[in-house]
Image: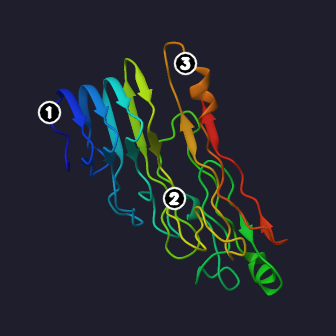
Amino acid sequence: VESTPPALSSLTVDAGGTLTLYGWDTLVQAETITVKAGGTIRTEGFILDGGVSNRVHLAGTTLTVEDGGRITADGAGYEGLAGPSWATATWGCHGERTGTSYYGGAYGGKQGYFGNGSKSEQSKQDMEPKPYGSAEWPFDPGSGGGCCARSGGGAIYLEFTGAVTVDGAITANASDTYKSSGNWYGVNASYGSGGGGRIALWSYKWMDETLKANCSAAGGAHGTTAYAVEPEAGTVYF
C-alpha cells in the first residue's frame, strides 16, 4: 500500500498473508483490523538521511493481533550513522566523521560505548550521539547504529477507539548483525549497543496492568569485556 486507501469496515490479514505499508503519510483505516496467526502487517526499507521514510499507521475501532501474528517496523529506521541522534555527533580519527563509530545509536536512552587503549584515546574528541524525541508522543524512527550500516527501528502508530488485543507481537527493533549497534551477538563485539527506544500508550479507559508490565524499551545487549559501557533504557509512557 503506497497511499491511503478508502476506509474499510473490516480488514483481516490471514495466515501467510503480508500487508506492507510504504510512505510516512499512508494510513490504513478499518472499523475492525485483525492479524491472524502467521499474518503480518509491516513496513520495510531503512531511511537515508533526507530521504522518504516509512511507517506503520493503522486506525479504527478495534485491533486484534492473534498469537503468532505480527505488526512490525523492524529495521525501518535510519541507516547506520544517520538520523537525529547523529546530527551533531563526530567520530573517527579526532572527530573527523570518518570510518565507523564506537558508539551505538541513541533514541529514548543513551547509547552504549566500547573503547580500549588507542581506541578510547582516539575517541576523546568525539561528540557522542544524543537521545531525542518525546516520551509522550514518540513519532520519530530510530537512528542507525555506529557500525556496518545497520539501521534503527522504525515507527508504528496505532489509533483505536475500542478494544486493542495483542497476543502476538508488535516490534520496531533495530537491525541485527554481529558487531551491530542496535542489538548484537557476540560478547567481544567492538562497537557500542543502541540505547532504548520509546513506547507511549494512551487510553481513556482502564489499562490492564499485565499490558503495562509487558512493555519494555531496554537498551541493546552489551559486551562482557571491561571496556563495554552499558546503554541506558528508553522511555515507557502511560
149 vs 7: above or below: below
Q: Position of residue 126 (x, y in %)?
A: 71, 74
Residue 155: percent from left, percent from top: 43, 47
Label 3 to label 2: alpha-carbon separation = 28 Å
Q: Residue at x 40, y 41 (%)?
A: 68
Q: Which residue is mark 1?
A: 6
Q: Answer above or below: position of 72 versus 238.
A: below
What's the residue type where badge 1 is placed? Pro
Residue at 60% x, 34% y: name it: 214
Instruction: Name the kind of residue labelled 2 in the image.
Output: Ala
Tell me: 226 left or right of 169: right
Mark 3 element type: loop
Residue at mark 3: 207
Point 34% across, 57% down: residue: 44
* Farthest top residue in view: 205
Q: Which residue is mark 2?
A: 174
- Tell which circle, 3 or 2, labels the residue nearer the N-terminal end: 2
First in sequence: mark 2 or mark 1?
1
**Label 3 with label 2: CB-CB less than 8 Å:** no
In the picture, measured across the screen, residue 184 lies left or right of residue 112, that is: left
